[in-house]
Image (cartoon, rainbow, N blue to C red):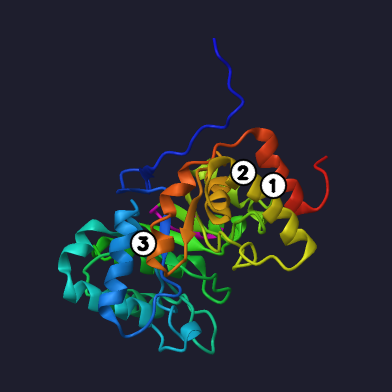
Amino acid sequence: MTVTNLLPAPSRSRALYAGGPTVSSIAWGMWRFAGEDVAAAEAKIIAALDAGVTLFDTADIYGPDNGEPFGAAEALLGRVFARNRALASKMVLATKGGIVMGVPYDSSAAYLQSAIDASLKRMGVERVALWQIHRPDMLTHPAEIAGALAAAHKAGKIGAVGVSNFTPSQVDALAAHLALPIVSCQPEFSPLAVAPLTNGIIDQAITKGMAVLAWSPLGGGRLADPRDERSRAVAKALDVKAAEAGVSRAAAAYSWIMAHPAGPIPIVGTQKPARIAEIPDAFKPRWTRADWYGVLVASMGEPLP
């Protein structure tokens, strides 16, 4: 029998949740999806689809960070669909809500109901596969949140419920009042943001069978342009694997994330079609345990126990 020391290669697709749609193991995110050029926006989506991406993640708050109105990214997607309706059937849509400018968080039943309806209207769709609470609202009882989400699901507006930036205990509090399963969590997770490995988020996801959608998988751009000793150390460790596989540092970073047995889904945020086309490169690197832990040690800045 041949024994290999390579970690299992990630699958290119997976079920988003039990009984749910099959999606790509890498998602494309729309945080920076902006502008008035609908043809250019359509080209980005087509580039992602051509690269094998079928899971697309957006949010109603995506817009103000780009100097645009609240809901601008969803509205731009809606204009793309109006131009090319066939695209919608090829995409599995996930969106988020619950952040309110100047508040900052509202997960009251009335607000969630209005936020879900507004997102669907902006995108010009009747349903999204996954709707996620973007940030936890400490001033709304989980039972109230659960009621609003169950009603939206029963009405056919959302296929499933997920959370973003929740702690494990916040997930448990909501789950205690929600008959529906919480099928996903969306933490910041990258070779520079490794807290989910030890704070219970990924452990809980494995326990409950939740998909892990990793936002900012390149450390908010710090891996592309490392400016401190820690970032440079992580970049150097990733570059070894990137050179070995003949891919970019970004592809190596996505690959490192996907190598974890929880099967985290990196949310790629690049808005450049040429860079989007490189997404499949993330499946090329293969990791040994020593290589993978080497990146983790570089990120921690100290040896493992």
Q: What residue type is labelled 1?
A: Val
N-term mark: 3 or 1: 3
* Residue at (36% x, 83% y) in the render: 35
Q: What element carries label 3?
A: strand
Decide if residue 117 is in sight here: no
Give the percent coordinates (x, y) of residue 143: 46, 65
Decide if residue 142 is in sight here: yes
Q: What residue type is labelled 3?
A: Phe
Seen in the picture, residue 67 relative to 85 is either above or below; the reply is: below
Whether the residues at callouts 3 and 1 have beta carbons within 8 Å, the answer is no
Residue under numbered circle 1: 295
Q: 269 or 265: nearer the eye?
A: 269
Q: Is residue 31 magenta?
A: no
Categorize mark 2 by other alpha carbons within 10 Å: few (<14), some (14-19), many (20+): many
Identify the main secondary structure in magenta.
loop
Seen in the picture, residue 183 relative to 225 is either above or below; the reply is: above
The magenta span reads: 173-180
Residue under numbered circle 2: 241
- Give the Cα distance between marks 3 and 2: 27 Å
Q: Please tell me the numbered disc located at residue 56.
A: 3
Give the percent coordinates (x, y) of residue 257: 56, 48
- Give the Cα distance between marks 3 and 1: 28 Å
* Residue at (50% x, 83% y) in the render: 65
* Occupied quadrant, residue 153: bottom left
* Residue at (30% x, 82% y) in the render: 37
